[in-house]
Image (spheres, grey):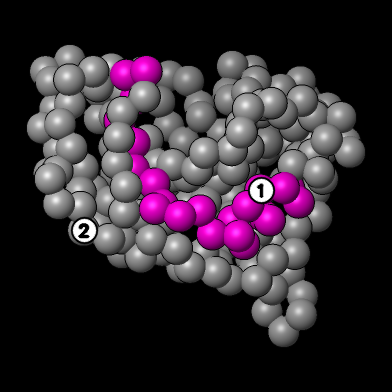
Amino acid sequence: MSHRGGPSGERTWPGATLDEGADLPPQSRWFFALWPPAPVREALAQQQARWTWPRRARLVPAARLHLTLHFLGPLEPSRRALLMSLPAVPFEPFEFAIERAGRWRGIAWMGPGEVPLPLLALHAALGEQLRERGFELEDRAYAPHVTMAREAAGACQPRVIDRVQWTVREYVLAASVPGERRDYAVLRRFSAWSGGAASVR
């Protein structure tokens, strides 16, 4: 099976099939996310470089930066196959700004100053679709953010944060693949409405 290589730390399965999703290691952790386009990813990496990090901090490589919509964790083969056949949740492109930063339980993060309603709507609609199919989702309030580093107690964020403008035109189904160097596999891409129809790649 051949896979197209993405940026370091990311592999993309173009036109992924049910078998390709099932071929991932059992410990793979599945999730839906907003995957930043290259200019947003580069801007986030520049912001990450402006933090002051403790020696023990584990920075998230630029290619793995993302904003989680729903985390599902390890899944049985039948559950994986169901995800690989899900229809797209209809949504229109929307825009928001990454302009806040903070730390929580050793996690350094950046996120929107004000959570846009279209993001909340996408999160809610996708969550409803997953619950209807029997997936268990996290029960806590949704706090969208991009994880910049782990084990980051004592990290100091920049005094001035440059706004990172993000136009969302798709969301993805991805999996964190265990191994010596944990890769992220982007399995499916769900595009925003174009002329009244959502598309899946």
Question: Looking at the image, which is closer to me, 82 or 31?
Answer: 31
User: Which numbered disc covers residue 123?
Assistant: 1
Q: Is residue 120 left or right of residue 164?
A: right
Q: Quadrant of the N terminus?
A: top right
Q: Amino acid at mark 1?
A: His
x, y (%) of residue 16?
A: 66, 48
Question: Looking at the image, which is closer to me, 138 or 59?
Answer: 138
Could you say whether the residue bearing mark 2 is in a helix, strand or loop?
Answer: loop
At horizontal 30% and vertical 35% (from top left) the residue drawn is: 102
x, y (%) of residue 9?
A: 36, 38
User: Which numbered disc covers residue 162?
Assistant: 2
Q: Quadrant of residue 193?
A: bottom right
Q: CA distance from mark 1 to mark 2?
A: 26 Å
Q: Is residue 23 visible?
A: no
Q: Can residue 114 be found in the magenta stretch?
A: yes
Could you say whether the residue bearing mark 1 is in a helix, strand or loop?
Answer: helix
Q: Quadrant of the C terminus?
A: bottom right
Q: Amino acid at mark 2?
A: Asp
Question: What segment is highlighted magenta in the picture?
Answer: 105-126
